[in-house]
Image: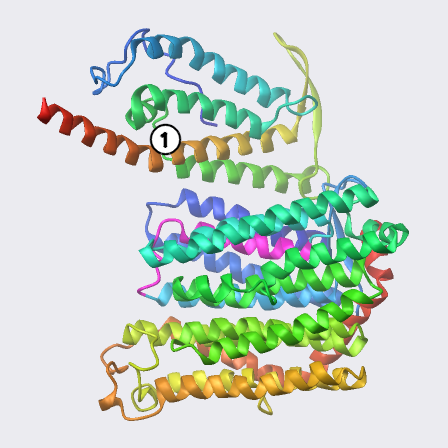
Amino acid sequence: MSPDVALPLLVGLPLGAAAVSLLLLGRPLVLQRTVSLVVLATMQVLSIVVVASVWDGSVVSVRVGAVDPAVGIVLAADPLGAIMLVVSSLMLWTVMVYAIGSQRTKEQAPAFHPLYLVLAAGVAASFLTADLFNLFVAFEVMLVASYVLITLGGSRDQVRHGMTYVVIGLLASTLFITAIGLVYAATGEVNLAALAVAMDQVPTGIRTALGLLLLVVFGVKAAIFPLFQWLPDSYPTAPSPVTALFAGLLTKVGVYAIIRTQTLLFPTGGEVSIALLVLAALTMTVGVVGAIAQNDIKRILSFHIVSQIGYMIFGLGLFTLAGIAGAVLYVVHHIVVKTTLFLVGGIVEERAGTGALDRLGGAMHTAPVLAVLFLLPALSLAGIPPFSGFVAKLSLAQSGFAAEQWVVTGVSLAVGLLTLFSMTKIWNGVFWGDPARAAVSLDREHVVAAPMTVATAILVTVSLAFVVAAGPLYDFSERAASVLLERGAYVQAVLR
Amino acid sequence: MIPPTGPVHRPTGPPAGPDANSPRRSVILDVVLDLVFRTAVLFGLFLLFAGHNAPGGGFVSGLVIGTALVLRYVAGGAAEVDRVLPLEEHVLLGAGLLLAFASGAAGWIFGGAFLYGAKATLEIPVLGTVNATSALVFDVGVDLVVIGLVLGLLRSLGAAADRDADDVDTRRGVAS
């Protein structure tokens, strides 16, 4: 299948499926489930087709409606967008399998399946669009679906924390559309490739201001310091599969947008680069320190999302080939591992009815499989060899030292140690100890449905496979980074 | 396609619904509504067809028709809206979205690209020469989505407001 069909289908198919899913409301749930699984699996296949077509470091593009790029919409996939698509579609279908098996997560709610598919379309569109305004549209499609998903169930707590999420989301969107207006006023373009050319003519001061404005906009979505408070506040209250998906995908869409705009539109680095490194160090530190003070699995993990975003920004801030390659590798590793950990946290909550560390204990004896499923990604998150986190952190640290950024690289290594501490804390609280002495234990009567465990196991296997495939994966990340830094291939593919 | 027109068969005057004698019904509003409702729906349809090359389109058309429905709600509550448009909102949303997607996918057949805009000039006996575009199908989809959304809002938020108002009325009745 050619990219001409695959790229529009990746965006259009989930939207069409959402429509079918809406029409199936009130019919047996199995129909909606089938539609969701078939479509998400198809997205996985399509995204692999896209990766295969850009594997050598080329860029493919499609003019939607065959309209000239000057006025029309262009979808483009470069290695970065393609690898993000593959990993995202993997998350989308595995988390869907998990949600179908789960009893307490409102998957039966009428709006769940249609909204999930709309979210999938928004995520795919964000990675594929080559147009700043359509990036805004894709973000909105994704966010509007997420506003409902995060409050599914409608408990008092969820509405209270969901409110924060919605208000921050709307605020960031308003700022985003304002920023697009200013970019258009300065250049007369919204097509990213045309902008890359036009932005060079803009005076340096204005260009830096626009760069920082877009950084703030996407910084809110990506939860970088100091714009992160909404995340640990709102994520833990959502249903587990929703939290897992948001943790894995939504903030990373923000990171993707930062990488895309900063490398394509503001390629010189300069002041923004220094700002990025400072923000990266602060994001890493604040996130990990915040996690230490928490006493709930999902809350600890939520703070860790913030901390890990810092690593990705660190890689970007170096503005070197190795740095950006490291950041790409880190994003890919992080999406898989983080989602897995949240899925494990969800299983613990489903079995024990709580995620509070001081009430749990001894799960290693009562739920040995779950213990292994937690331990592997947890060690990987902390960067212990030989897991994928080690590979990703090593490449970041090496590029940090190569660029002689001693402070921020040192911070990143220290934060890795504190991450290990947090993971140990969860391990001690939930899995270690005597099950008889815990207030609630994961006893054998409360087992979860097989799909939940299977979905989690698939993701653990994938993250282990990263270790085996680390070489080719790193080479691909390097090709992604060189496409980002050289810009020419992307611009030509979009404007051809 | 579901015709988004109002209650064409309904006789002029106060409605014969279960809440026809509700003390909250205003005769003036009912009479004015009879004039305005159909006009608004027609104007909405005009905007839908004018939309391709002139101001208008599916979204605006949906808003105008939706506003007409809101007027119905103001006059007679959620029950009145149900009688005017007895369709589930998710059916409208789903059908509209599907129609929009289908018109996009049809672009592969007509022009070899997703969302390709095909157009044809037709000679229709009464109307004369008509320029038909595939974008119109997309717009009809958008129209249905917006109407479905308004309907969903009126039913979910409006029905709760109706219940609250009924509670107040009941309590007042007990007091007097």
- Does residue A450 sit above or below B169 in this rendering? below
Q: Give the amino acid at mark 1.
A: Leu
* Residue B29 vs residue B138, the one in the foreground: B29
Circle 1 residues within 10 Å: few <14, some 14–19, many ≥20: some
Q: Where's residue A359, x and y in %? A: 29, 81
* Residue A158 vs residue B128, the one in the foreground: A158
Give the residues drawn in magenta, as a range. Answer: A103-128
Q: Quadrant of the N terminus of chain A?
A: bottom right
Quadrant position of residue A369? bottom left
Name the subunit of mark 1.
B
Q: Is residue A367 left or right of residue B102?
A: left
Residue at image coords 61%, 50%:
A138
Q: Where's residue A141, x and y in %? A: 56, 48
The residue labelled by disc 1 is B87
- Does residue A185 sit above or below A287 in this rendering? above
Find out whether residue A109 is within the magenta segment.
Answer: yes
Q: Is residue B109 left or right of residue A439?
A: right
Query: How was this image coloured?
Result: rainbow
